[in-house]
């Protein structure tokens, strides 16, 4: 039996890199046309583009590449310096969040990685809190796409959030990545909702569109997110195998209730 309609509490976005075949201005025009509110993962030289089309950047690229993150104390000084430079610019551009990464394990235990992340992130939280920008750590799979990445379980990120104890630190719960690592997506969303500041979607397996070729029931997941009262952004981060804008419009309709 089909589920009845629901009223979304969130807004929708799209990850720039998945649709990089389109110039950013064109992507913004198309995104606006199909009902999106924002573009994800833009760098400093791109932040002003969505505003020209009545959109915003939902989350800005932050300091450092994915493998070299906050779990390495030797990188803290450089990451802090770049974060302190970027955060005022992010705030000035009206962007609500900046993405960060744990980095790869390189032999660290989870306990060590959590402690190192907490120690480093505490150094930039006062600036984030003062400016009203949320530092958002992405959860990624270490099984298929990002070998050795440490923040590959929801509980790892939650432990950092609990230690930091700030509303300006949240998790980017990437549904594709966490389905690969742990499954139980709906219950995880409902249980850990207070720690989640952003969502990404994609089909499993393959990271493609949200259709019946993949194993996730995204209609049920959309309903779960709405049921938590989440008011941030759900961003589509899939690599289309067919006509990009048609498939993106299908995802938007699915999450529109």
Image (cartoon, rainbow, N blue to C red):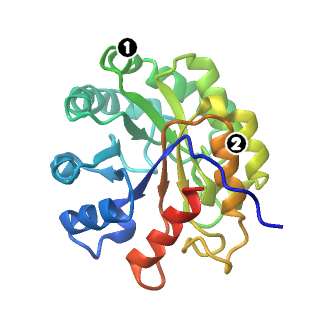
Please name the residue that numbered disc 1 is placed on: 126
Q: Quadrant of the C terminus?
A: bottom right
Quarter of the image for residue 69 reads top left
Residue 71 shown left or right of residue 215 in the figure: left
Q: Residues within 10 Å of mark 1 (few under 14, many from 20)?
A: few
Q: Which of pointers 1 and 2 indicates the residue nearer the eye?
A: 2
Q: Which mark, residue 253? A: none
Q: Decide which of 118, 168 is in the foreground and name it.
A: 168
Please name the residue that numbered disc 2 is placed on: 189
Residue 72 shown left or right of residue 86 in the figure: right
Residue at (63, 43) in percent of width and height: 226
Task: Please tell me whether residue 178 is drawn above or below residue 71 in the rendered image.
Answer: below
Residue at (68, 50) in percent of width and height: 223
Task: Please tell me whether residue 153 is drawn above or below residue 96 in the rendered image.
Answer: below
Residue 197 lies, in percent from the top left, at 52, 36
Residue 123 lies, in percent from the top left, at 40, 18
Residue 67 lies, in percent from the top left, at 46, 50
Q: Residues within 10 Å of mark 2 (few under 14, many from 20)?
A: many
Residue 75 shown left or right of residue 104 in the figure: left
**First of labels 1, 2 by sequence position:** 1
Measured Cα–Cα span from mark 1 to mark 2: 28 Å
Farthest residue toward the front?
4
Q: Quadrant of the N terminus?
A: bottom right
Task: Please tell me whether residue 193 is drawn above or below residue 163 in the rendered image.
Answer: below
Residue 239 lies, in percent from the top left, at 47, 73
Q: Decide which of 187, 230 is in the foreground and name it.
A: 230
Question: Tag 2, which secondary structure?
Answer: helix
Quarter of the image for residue 228 reads top right
Quarter of the image for residue 153 reads top right
Residue at (32, 17) in percent of width and height: 127
Question: Tag 1, which secondary structure?
Answer: helix
Q: Decide which of 91, 53 is in the foreground and name it.
A: 53
């Amino acid at each position: 039996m089909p589920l009845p309609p629901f009223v979304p509490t969130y807004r929708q976005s799209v990850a720039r890199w998945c649709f990089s075949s389109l110039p950013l201005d064109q992507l913004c025009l198309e995104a606006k046309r199909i009902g999106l509110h924002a573009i994800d993962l833009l760098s400093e030289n791109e932040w002003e583009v969505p505003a020209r089309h009545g959109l915003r950047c939902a989350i800005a690229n932050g300091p450092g590449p994915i493998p070299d993150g906050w779990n390495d104390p030797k990188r803290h000084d450089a990451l802090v310096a770049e974060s302190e430079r970027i955060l005022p610019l992010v705030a000035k551009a009206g962007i609500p969040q900046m993405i960060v990464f744990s980095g790869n394990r390189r032999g660290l235990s989870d306990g060590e990685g959590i402690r190192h992340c907490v120690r480093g992130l505490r150094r930039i939280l006062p600036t984030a809190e003062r400016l009203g920008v949320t530092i958002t750590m992405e959860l990624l799979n270490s099984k298929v796409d990002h070998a050795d990445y440490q923040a590959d379980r929801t509980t790892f990120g939650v432990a950092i959030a609990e230690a930091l104890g700030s509303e300006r630190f949240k998790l980017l719960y990437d549904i594709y990545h966490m389905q690969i690592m742990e499954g139980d997506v709906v219950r995880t969303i409902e249980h850990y909702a207070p720690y989640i500041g952003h969502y990404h979607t994609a089909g499993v397996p393959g990271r493609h569109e949200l259709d019946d070729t993949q194993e996730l029931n995204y209609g049920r997941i959309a309903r779960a997110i709405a049921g938590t009262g989440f008011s941030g952004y759900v961003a589509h981060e899939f690599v289309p195998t067919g006509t990009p804008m048609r498939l993106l419009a299908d995802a938007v309709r699915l999450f529109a209730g």
